[in-house]
Image (tube, rainbow, N blue to C red):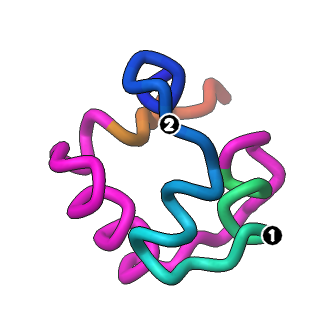
Amino acid sequence: MILGARLLKIDDVTKGTGISRTTLTNIYYRKSENIELKTLRKICDFLQIPLSELIEYTPQTK
């Protein structure tokens, strides 16, 4: 949603962060299970947003 609101493409983030397109695509389509904190930091720094705006965690019910 953030990329769409800012009219950004994955290629823009790749160029601005140095993160591979494959990694960003997997994050974008929620295919990644383990994302490194340094990757999240780079994305947040590029977008100038706090981590809480980038990801949301909802605990699983038992």
| 59 sits to left or right of 27 | left
> Quadrant location of residue 43?
bottom left
Give x and y (percent) for residue 39: 45, 75
Query: Which one is nearer the viewer's eye here, 36 or 21?
Result: 21
Separation of residues labelled 2 and 1 (CA atoms)? 16 Å
Q: Residue 62: where, in percent of width, then height?
A: 67, 29
Identity, as a three-letter code, of the amino acid under mark 2: Leu
How many C-alpha atoms fall within 10 Å of the one at disc 1: few (<14), some, or many (≥20)? few
Which residue does the image show at 75% across and 60% down from the upper left? 32
Quarter of the image for residue 42 reads: bottom left
Q: Amino acid at mark 1?
A: Thr
Q: Which residue is mark 2?
A: 8
Is residue 45 magenta-colored?
Answer: yes
2 vs 1, front mark:
2
Badge 2 vs badge 1, beta-carbon distance below 8 Å? no
Seen at 62% across and 25% down, the residue is 61
Q: Earlier in the sequence, mark 2 or mark 1?
A: 2
Residue 43 vs residue 59: left or right?
left
- Most foreground residue, 42 or 61: 42
| Number of numbered labels in the structure image | 2
Q: Quadrant of residue 46?
A: bottom left
Residue stretch in magenta: 28-53
**Up-down: is 43 above or below 22?**
above
> Is residue 57 magenta-colored?
no
Residue at 42% across, 74% down: 17
Q: Kindly state the secondary structure of the residue where label 2 is placed.
A: loop
The residue shown at (42%, 17%) is: 5
Residue carrying label 1: 22
